[in-house]
Image (cartoon, rainbow, N blue to C red):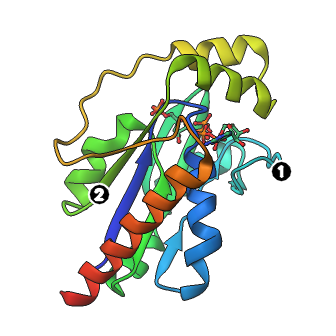
Amino acid sequence: MSGTFVAVVGPSGVGKDSVIGFARDRLEASGNVVFVRRIVTREADGGSEDHDSMDEGEFAEAERNGAFALSWGAHGLRYGLPIALERDLAAGRVVVANLSRRIIPQLVARYPHAIVVSLTADRAVIAERLAGRGRETAESIEKRLNRNVSDPLPASTVCIDNAGAIETAGQQFVRLLEDALRQDERV
Ligand SMILES: Nc1ncnc2c1ncn2[C@@H]1O[C@H](COP(=O)(O)OP(=O)(O)O)[C@@H](O)[C@H]1O
Ligand SMILES: O=P(O)(O)OC[C@H]1O[C@H](OP(=O)(O)OP(=O)(O)O)[C@H](O)[C@@H]1O
């Protein structure tokens, strides 16, 4: 596969979907950078992530049938990335998705050249953003804030600070994707 998988990770509320959306608005039209639409066992909510929904039964069946390149569970939900992303990688495209930190070892095993981007911001900023997003209850926000993920990320992980304006982190991420694209075109 000649394309590059770019995985965006970080704690709930840090801004993964927002940073991905910033880049999508600028790069999707080129057709060379693909933004994966995840399948989640959560109702579509009109929030920052535009995802497809399945119920638990449909998701389990799709998983058994090999419909997902990667799938995982978190926050009482199941998440899947459609297997079609492998066609985009084979075609030399850059493929961007929001992933759990816990699935990164499997991602790297399957796509050894994947780039992992870790977004950061301090807890107080994240707490404020989760409250402002208004998708979860106070109890669920507390659980997200206290979710402890200790799985190590690859040494090559690129950290982008999203404590400031969305444009700051967003532009850094756009540059990273443009670099990845240039790299793919050279291979
Ligand atoms: N740099 C930023 N500045 C201000 N608000 C932000 C920034 N990044 C994200 N947000 C807001 O914070 C909330 C959580 O962002 P979201 O992208 O949904 O995070 P995640 O996907 O990591 O859970 C959203 O309401 C979003 O609009
Ligand atoms: O194992 P973690 O690294 O903590 O991540 C767990 C899950 O939470 C996020 O999704 P989701 O959209 O449900 O939550 P978020 O938008 O609040 O991050 C992330 O994309 C993972 O799917």
Residue 89 % position (x, y): 35, 77
Quadrant in the rendering for residue 120:
top left
Quadrant in the rendering for residue 112:
bottom left
Residue 76 % position (x, y): 61, 26
Quarter of the picture holding the C terminus: bottom left
Instruction: Identify which residue is drawn at 56% across, 39% down.
Output: 164
State if disc 1 and disc 2 touch (CB < 8 Å). no
Residue 182 sits above or below residue 123 on the image? below
Residue 115 sits above or below residue 106 on the image? below
Residue 105 sits above or below residue 187 on the image? above
Q: Foreground residue, 121 or 4? A: 121
Residue 183 % position (x, y): 24, 79
Whether residue 66 is visible, yes or no, is no
Say which element carries label 1.
loop
**Label 1 neighbourhood size at 10 Å, few (<14), some (14-19), many (20+)?**
few
**Label 2 neighbourhood size at 10 Å, few (<14), some (14-19), many (20+)?**
many
Give the quadrant of ligand 1.
top right
Instruction: Report the amino acid beneath label 2.
Output: Ile
Which residue lies under the disc numbered 1? Answer: 46
Q: Is 24 left or right of 43, judged from the image as shown?
A: left
Label 2 beta carbon less than 8 Å to ligand 2: no
Q: Is 31 left or right of 154, judged from the image as shown?
A: right
